[in-house]
Every structure is written in structure tokens, then in C-alpha cells.
Image (cartoon, helix red, strand yellow):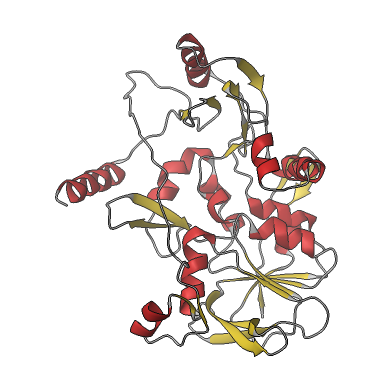
Amino acid sequence: MQIIQASYKRRQTSMGWVSEQFICAFLVGCTFLSVLSHPDKVIGGGTCGCPLAATLSQGARVLVLERRGSPYTNPEQINIKNFVNSLADISPSSFSQPFISRDGVLNSRARVLGGGSVLNAGFYSRASSTYIRDSGWNETLAKDSYKWVEEKVAFEPPMLQWQSAVKDGLLEVGVLPYSGFTFDHLYGTKVGGTIFDKEGNRHTAADLLEYADPKRISVYLHATVQKILFKYNTEKRRPQAYGVIFKDALGVMHRAYLSTKGKNELILSAGAIGSPQLLLLSGIGHANHLEAHGIKVVLDQPLVGQGMADNPLNVLVVPSPVPVEASLVQTLGITKFGSFIEAASGLSLGHSWSERLQGIFEFVSNQ
């Protein structure tokens, strides 16, 4: 086992000064591991997986498997000024895995501890009260959970020249009322939260691992899960997961088995694309499709991987004759017909990024 050694800066949060070394105390590389000891929970290391792992570590032994590295190795890479550069970086060690769908839609998958919160525009807002009720959530618990997250990663944005102009423009065209700064989901125009602090440093879901019990959690980096292991449960008459096979940075395969005692769980948290992909590779999906690819069928579930759709997005790029501040989404217009109006500024598109966009447009136009 190789422990990551690094000297990380202390930074000020809403809870005081926190050392990033605290998180890194239980981040390890998985090179040269033997079969792992039996954890109670195995979880992915994305935006949902990190807070879930931190919570569950209060009462269980948790293993987090992340296919790539840590966002703390290069803090400058996730600063707001490098937002475009991080997305455009296609090097093997980048946090972004770009791809183009068959429909020609440009997108990126995160490959780093903290998932999409390391790459996205950093806007923070709560779900609407209607959504919480319709989902059957406990409203009090949901509110407490939001506060739990906000104490670590959510900030009030500075609202400089560009974002203030966007706010005024939305109000002028009738996106009303104006609710000021709030985390709540409200119709009209509002200023929402941001996961960038006043220095432009991004605070990702990986920061929520500060809540974890370091004695009960292990986070393995460069550990790419290849397959979920299933056995047939004769009592419940269905397959039951009992572990995973994963590959380390050198390509060596390893296994992690769940504890056979108590309530053990394998929680699949690999993202909208990665989760169904992993289920399919493990034998859960449409039987005919799996057999056509030589995958042994564990459970015939025809809807796995189906119904995927991109969120529709219209982008208007306005070249500015004068410099404007670098800002991502801060002001938001929420309409009652279901659209969201937001803006960013000061994001310099370098030559390589511009060339890439041009190539994508040419590709799409030729389809």
C-alpha cells in the first residue's frame, strides 16, 4: 500500500482553518495491494459517493474506490481561472474525460475524487420544496443535510460587474420577483451559492470527506472497478453482490469482498454513464444485448442503460471589447415553464480550445 505524501496548504472555511492533509490521511494508492479486508460498504468516489461515504463511516467500515487521482495534488488546476483549461485538458492525467455522443453532443466525464464537482460551473442551489415532497424525502432531514453540505463547500458569491449586469437584465425583461442571495429554489431571479471561495479556489465534494471517521474509512485512488461480483441468494431468490474486481494504476487486478456479518452493501455511485455501464459489464441488463457481447447474464433487466438523454442547452457567446471579471454561474433566472437562465464571464478560450470547438461543429454539420 502506498500512502500519498504531500504538503497541503491550510485554508479558511466557514468552520475555521482546515488542513487538506486531514483528508489525505486516508487517501492511498492501490498499487501492490493483496485481497482487501472485508468492509461493510463499498462506494464510488464521485459527487454523491463522497458525502455518502463520510456519513456511513460514522457507523460502518467503508471502502471508497476512485478510478483516478485526488483534486488536492494540484489546487491551481481547479481554481476558477483554469475552468476552461481543465475541461479542455485531454492528457492522461487530466480530471476531465471528454467525449462526443453519436448525436454530436460535446460532453465530459469527471475522473477524479469528488467527481463532477471538480469540473462543473460550481453553482449551488437546493432542490425545490415540491421536488423534496414528491421524492418522499423527510423535509426536516433534507434541510439539515443541505446545511451539512453548505458548511463545507457553499459560499455567497461576490457579485461583481458582469453578474450584477445579468441580474439587472433579467429583472428588466420580467424574470420576477428578485429574491436576492438564497440557496432556496425560487421562481424569478436570484443569486445562488457557489463552491468557489473568494480566492477562486474550488471546494469539491471530496471536501465532505472531512466529516468521515478516518479510522473507519479507506479511499483508494487509481482503482478502476471492472466488475461487480454476484452470487445467488437462495433465500431471496435473486443475485446478491458480495464484492468487486478492480484494476490498479499498473493494470494489476485486485478483489474487495464485503463483510459477511451485519448489514453490508455495495453502493454503485459511478455517475449517470458509469453506473449502468458497470451493471452491464457485470451481467445485469438486457439479456440479448449482454449475450451478444459475450457477457454472462446475471439478471435480465432490459431497462438498464436505457432512457439516457442530454439536457437541452442553448449557448450564446458574447465577445467583450473590454476585460470582465472571471465568473461562473452566480445569478440565476428560474422560469415557471422550466428553463434556467444563467451566465459566465471572463473565460478565455485559447487557440487549442477554439480549434476543438470548430472541429466539433464541423463534425456535427457533416452528420
Residue for point 37% across, 49% down: 88
Is 177 left or right of 295, judged from the image as shown? right
Q: Percent position (x, y) of residue 60? A: 82, 70
Q: Residue drawn at (53%, 26%), measured in percent from left and top?
A: 332
Confirm whether residue 226 shows in the render: yes
Report how many numbered discs are placed on residues in the image: 0
Which of the pair 54/293 is nearer the observer?
A: 293
Looking at the picture, tell me which residue is in the foreground, 5 or 225. Answer: 225
The answer to whether 132 is drawn above or below residue 28 in the figure is above
Most distant residue in the right direction? 59
Q: Residue at x 73, y 42 (%)?
A: 146
Direction from residue 305 to residue 207 in the image, left or right: right
- What residue is drawn where x is 51% and y is 45%? 120
Viewer-proximal residue among 35 and 242: 242
Q: Position of residue 206 (x, y in %)?
A: 66, 55
Residue 34 seen in this snapshot: no
Which quarter shows the N terminus?
Answer: bottom right
Specify the quadrant of the image occupied by residue 289: bottom left
Residue 231 left/right relative to 264? left
Percent x, y for residue 311?
A: 42, 44
Residue found at the far left of this picture: 366
| Residue 237 in picture, x, y percent from top left | 66, 85
- Say above or below: 86 vs 280: above
